Amino acid sequence: SGVGEQALRRVLLPLGSLHKHHVRELAASAALSTAAKPDSVGLCFVGKRNFGQFIDQFVSASPGHIVDLHGNQIATHNGTHFFTIGQRAKVGGLQEKMFVVDKSGREVLVAPGTHHPALYRTHVTCQNFSWVGGAAPPCAQGRWWGRTRHRQPLLPCRVQWQEVEEGGGEE
C-alpha cells in the first residue's frame, strides 16, 4: 500500500467475518457519511471523470501497437499507460475478447479469453510499498496468502525480500 502507517493508525482491521451489508449498517448507526456511498470500482481520486481525459492532463500520448501472442499487430493505442495487465483490451473487429498480458516499450501484448495460460503468473514483484503495523515479519515464518485482484480468491504464496540499492536498482 502507498498509504503510510500514520494515516492508518486508528483503523481497525480486519473486518473478519463481517459481510459488507453489515459493515454498512454499522457505519449508518455511527452516522458515518460513507455508509450509503456507492462502491468504488475505479480510481477514487479521479471522481466521475473520463479516465482517459484525466490521465491525458499528466502523461503525454505515446502511440504504439497492440500485439497478439504470435507477434501480429492487431491494433494501435495512444499509450501503454492506458492499460493494466489483466484488463480487457478493447480491440474492435475480433471475435474473441482480448486481455492484456504484458507491456513493453510501446507494445501491449494481448491474449484471447480470460483463462489463457499467458495471463497467469508464478511471481509478482512489488515495489515502493508501506508495511503497516510495525516491522515486517521475517518471510520464512508464518503462512502467507495473497491475491492480485480484489475479487480473486486468496492463494498460498511465498514472500521474498530483495534489497534495493540507493541508486534504485535491485541487487
Image (spheres, helix red, strand yellow):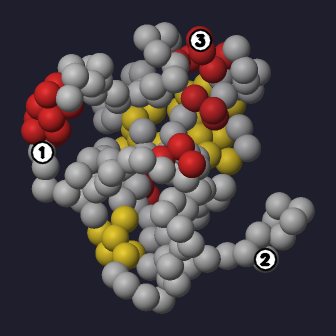
Hey, which quadrant is residue 91 in on the image? top left
Instruction: Compute the Cα span from label 3 to label 2.
Output: 38 Å
The disc labelled 3 sits on which kind of residue? Gln
Instruction: Compute the Cα span from label 2 to label 1.
Output: 43 Å
Q: Position of residue 118 (x, y in %)?
A: 43, 58
Q: Which mark is residue 171?
A: 2
Q: Nearer the viewer, residue 16 or 51?
A: 16
Q: Nearer the viewer, residue 109 or 156?
A: 156
- Please name the residue shown 48% across and 63% down the image: 133
Q: Position of residue 110 (x, y in %)?
A: 48, 44
Q: Label 3: which residue?
A: 53
Q: Is residue 106 left or right of residue 23?
A: right
Q: Is residue 69 among the parts visible in the rendering?
A: yes
Q: Label 1: which residue?
A: 19
- Please name the residue shown 34% across and 70% down the image: 145
- Please name the residue shown 31% across and 35% down the image: 96
